[in-house]
Amino acid sequence: MAIVDVKVPQLSESITEATMLNWKKKAGDAVAVDEILIEIETDKVVLEVPAPSAGVLTEILQGDGATVTAEQVIAKIDSEAVAGAAAPAAAAPAAAAAAPAAAPAAAAAASNNSKAGVAMPAAAKILADNNLSAANVAGSGKDGRVTKGDALSAIKGGAAIPTGVPTTALPQVAAPAVSLGDRPEQRVPMTRLRARIAERLLQSQATNAILTTFNEVNMAPVMDMRKKFQDSFVKEHGVKLGFMSFFVKAAVHALKKFPAVNASIDGNDIVYHGYFDIGIAVSSPRGLVVPILRNADQMSFADIEKKIAEFGQKAKDGKLGIEDMTGGTFSISNGGTFGSMMSTPIINPPQSAILGVHATKDRAVVENGQIVIRPMNYLAMSYDHRIIDGREAVLSLVAMKDALEDPSRLLFDL
């Protein structure tokens, strides 16, 4: 017998612990090298834990929902064993002890039903939106896959167990659903990521002197430019020319003119950053995340669009790494994606400002004494008034407006 430890991966310096999500294997199952055994959620990202060796998962030391630390041993693999050849050394903490003679049969049954607990794409999205686990929903699809209908039935009937909640802890936490006649309720614990988001938002409100300034932008010049070059851009770079690259370029343009907006406070010092790392707020199934475009001033429009597309896919798949979201000197939040007309975004500490972008709509405006229809976007910039004066805030937003209404300014840094 050659036992190999499965350990929690190294966490970042600012993260001390993580939460186990759902084991994808059971004690007694065969595993392949680098096969993903479980996902672990920190307050920033979700990390995958691969099998360090092929063999049989003989023991699970930490069950779903457990709190663990970096390098902690969470399971053991016998690299010389064959699944079904012998009973596993120990069962998972949350599982009931099984008779040794039944282990080979259980392993074989698990092998025959390997797709159980796997959700189809539409079902996976529904379950993620409702913080539920596919592993606890009975699947009626091929090989036990969870279908969209199964997911909807589980939510309606309250039959599924919330993701990340240890089965043994359910009685203490609360039932997944409580019947109050025609007024049902469901109580689930916050995920570690959601709790961290809440903590940082409260921290921002409590420690920053936040004000918000607004301006309106005629997006016609940007829309015309996109329409003119879209086909050539896609053919040359393999990605669409979106609006966000224009907003990033306009923001960097303004930050160069007004360095305080790109600065941060450290104790009694103001730190002026000589680089431009722009955070892009991205919605993911587990909550809002802000990956960073590093050295955005050195990126082309194509570089920005490709990186944003990469971040969006990573967020959707839960693949964003800690290095993707560490740092940042300024952020952009695009509520317009969801149809927002106006908002006052909250600063992402330790940054000192954030730009809120909203939906572009045809509106009546006055130009040269005439009422005309233009595609208008309302921009909002929240800033920390401790280091950014109203003049700098207003003028930096005006600089962004000017760059968007005349994109050629970006070419000549005007």
Image: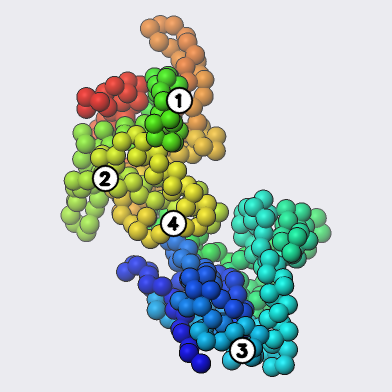
Q: Nearer the viewer, residue 44 or 179?
A: 44
Of circles 4 and 1, which is in front? 1
Q: For residue 185, which quarter of the picture? A: bottom right
Gap between marks 2 and 3, in whole Å? 51 Å
Q: For residue 231, which quarter of the picture? A: top left
- The quarter of the image holding the C terminus is top left
> Mark 3 or mark 4: which comes first in sequence?
3
Gap between marks 2 and 4, in whole Å? 19 Å
> Mark 4 or mark 1: which comes first in sequence?
1
According to the image, label 2 marks what residue?
A: 295
Identify the residue shown where x is 37% and y is 55%. 325
For the residues labelled 1 and 2, say whether their Cβ atoms are less than 8 Å apart. no
For the residues labelled 2 and 3, say whether their Cβ atoms are less than 8 Å apart. no
Q: Can residue 311 be spotted in the picture?
A: yes
According to the image, label 1 marks what residue?
A: 231
Helix, strand or loop at label 3? It is loop
> Mark 3 or mark 1: which comes first in sequence?
3
Please tell me whether residue 131 is drawn above or below residue 108 in the rendered image.
above
Of circles 2 and 3, which is in front? 3
**Residue 71 in the image, given as x and y percentages of width and height:** 39, 79
User: Residue extending furthest right?
Assistant: 181
> Mark 2 or mark 3: which comes first in sequence?
3
Q: Is residue 85 left or right of residue 143?
A: left
Identify the residue shown where x is 43% and y is 81%. 72
Gap between marks 1 and 2, in whole Å? 27 Å
Which amino acid type corresponds to the residue marked 4 in the rendered image?
Leu
Mark number displayed over residue 320: 4
Q: Nearer the viewer, residue 235 or 345?
A: 235
Helix, strand or loop at label 1? It is helix
Which amino acid type corresponds to the residue marked 1 in the rendered image?
Asp
